[in-house]
Amino acid sequence: MATLTISGLHKRFGTVEVLRGIDLEARTGEFVALVGPSGCGKSTLLAMIAGLESVSEGEIRIDGRLVNSVAPKDRDIAMVFQSYALYPTMTARQNMTFGMESRGVPKAEQEAAIKRVAALLQIEPLLNRKPGQLSGGQRQRVAMGRALVRDPKLFLFDEPLSNLDAKLRVDMRTEIKKLHLRVGKTTIYVTHDQIEAMTLASRIAVMHQGSIQQFDEPQVVYDHPANIFVAGFMGSPSMNFIPGELTKVDGHPAVAIALAGGETAMLPLPQPPQSRPANGKVVLGVRPEHLFRYDPNLKSQKAGLAMLTAPVEVVEPTGAETHAVLKVGEREIVGRFDPDGAPRLGELLPLGIDMAHACLFDPDTQALIRQGSA
Amino acid sequence: MVDATYDIALDPLARSASLRYAAGRIAIYSFLGFFALIYLLPLFVVVANSFRELPEITRNGLIALPHSFSLKAWPQAWAHYCVAGTCEGIKRNFYNSLIMTIPATIASTLLGAINGYVLSKWRFPGSETLFVCILLGVFMPGQVALLPWAYILGNLRLSDSVYGLILVHVIQGISFTTLFCRNYYVNIPDDLIKAARIDGAGFWRIFAKIILPLSPPILIVTVIWQFTGIWNEFLFGLVFTGGTQQPITAALVALATSQMNAHPYDVASSAVLIGAIPPLLIYLFGGKYFVRGLTQGAIK
């Protein structure tokens, strides 16, 4: 069992700084997802953990041992690549034994490892086939098998599901989760897909422009995003951002937002903000699932429900739920509605906003303004 | 019935179109056939002359339809004809060429593969510049290197020796073989190398176990290219070797220019054909791989 500790990690290519001071730690058996848009540095970070990229500054420790200048093969890691990187001229079995042969593992031990892993991944019938004769999902399994025969301290996954079609991706995602529950290895998983990160990880590190924006448990990242970037990146459809101003209604804190025609809507805040930006300006963040068709019954169930009216611009049924684009002031916001009683095109919708789940951000620093009694 | 009326209605138009098409095809193929004939004519003359009797050639002229048939010229050319005082035919020169071409082909191909592997998969600061420098060799005519080679071979005491020619051809060939292999290896995904490094394989093990097994298409191209190139090359052979050390191409030049008595057109023709057989065989057996290898892209 193993831990990974990264502190003050920098990576520079010439004058370009790709990673700007990364601090990260994975506890024994933990599943950490590195998630972010392309170019955020997540794959570089993974390559540095693997030893495929050199360290410009900072420390990487596996199980407390400083591995900055240790060769990849001596770090006791295994990696699954986006392209699978199976050796095309070797059979699945040879792909899996290649590493053990390089390290001089005795034949009998190799056989035992192949047997164990093939049974675990149910790939016994594929062992004598070459990668060219395998489907995408089968290649994925063999690639994981190649990583598993090693019994490494650390598992590294580099976007392993992005080359699969949508349905297979969901299946394999579940497989990886099951596998992790069974094997219990410390795992670092790079993905650009926030749903993969949410479903798989015990903790998520959201990366943007070479630094970690937030590192926390999935639900915390989702419910209390550290800043506007994280809030917008996690969740689909994205969180809606509405510019507003902090104010008071009957002595209670509220957010005032501008509606079309110069009107202003006052949305009361169930929990007072812990801090207040200098000019009182804030960005109100509301997730699509916290928008409802307003009715008084709902108001009695949800304490923080605020109400305004918004014209419906576009309606997109997806089957399980219906997405609707609504106009609030100059902005378009997206809501997820139950298909029963979903907004109709052209309707002036009485819109309920669940303010108990809304987030406030400082428009200057982009950071979350915490709410609740301090 | 309905179809028939329909056909008739369109018939004149369709007929003239198909006629025009046929006429065009006939024109194109006769044009191509004519030029193919011109191109093949010299080969025909040489093959015919190798089977004609010398007196008949001198009587009817070099370019004439054969009126006699004889196999005498072939063994004569192979083992008995006298060039510059030695009467051993071109046998020895043929072996010289084999002794020179085979190791030079293998060595230059292997070196090209290793160079290509380094320049595509183990890049280092300046490796692109180095590649451009190596590429210059592709565009440099061989005669530019004549004097430097004369100097080097002289100092190495390898002038007038087949081994000297091996060295020359290996070095001269590296530019091409490196270019071929490097461009082929660039298309091999880098992830394979990374995976192998994590698997604990080093530089040579990755080359032997992963890169080489993927290489047959490009190695066949390189071997054919090098073999025919080195075999057919005669400038270096002519300049740096003489007599018993000459490769076959240089010997053919000597044979063609030594005019003691009547010009031996029959023997010269068979000698030329003997000299052309190995590259012809290589191309016959490897030709389809050559085209396939040159056009083959990335390995998935």
Image (spheres, rainbow, N blue to C red):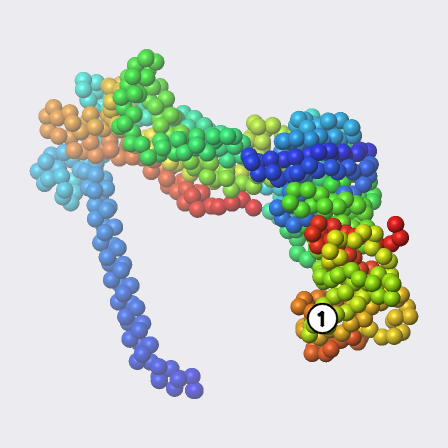
Where does the N terminus of chain A fall, quadrant-wise?
Answer: top right
Expressed as whole percent of the image width and height from the top left, the position of residue A132 reads: 60, 47
Expressed as whole percent of the image width and height from the top left, the position of residue B204 reads: 56, 27
Three-letter amino acid code of the residue under disc 1: Leu
How many numbered markers are drawn?
Answer: 1
Expressed as whole percent of the image width and height from the top left, the position of residue B14 reads: 33, 76
Asked if residue A248 is positioned above or below residue B122 in the image, the reply reads below
Instruction: Give the camera-side residue of A74 and B161.
Output: A74
Task: Name the element at disc 1.
Answer: loop
For the point 55% across and 34% down, the residue is A14
Q: Is residue A251 left or right of residue B114?
A: right
Q: Chain of mark 1?
A: A
Visible in this render: residue B142?
A: yes
Asked if residue B59 is positioned above or below residue A249 in the image, the reply reads above
Q: Is residue A138 left or right of residue B237?
A: right
Instruction: Give the camera-side residue of A204 and A19.
Output: A19
Q: Which residue is farthest left?
A: B59
For the point 21% across and 48% down, the residue is B38
Instruction: Give the camera-side residue of A51 and A292.
Output: A292
Instruction: Give the camera-side residue of B122 and A239.
Output: A239
Res A62 → quadrant: top right
For the point 27% across and 65% down, the residue is B24
Q: Is residue B220 left or right of residue A24?
A: left
The residue that mark 1 highlights is: A259
Res A4 → quadrant: top right
Q: Is residue B158 left or right of residue A6?
A: left
Res B247 → quadrant: top left
Circle 1 residues within 10 Å: few <14, some 14–19, many ≥20: some
Visible in this render: residue A110?
A: no
Asked if residue A344 is positioned above or below residue A150 in the image, the reply reads below
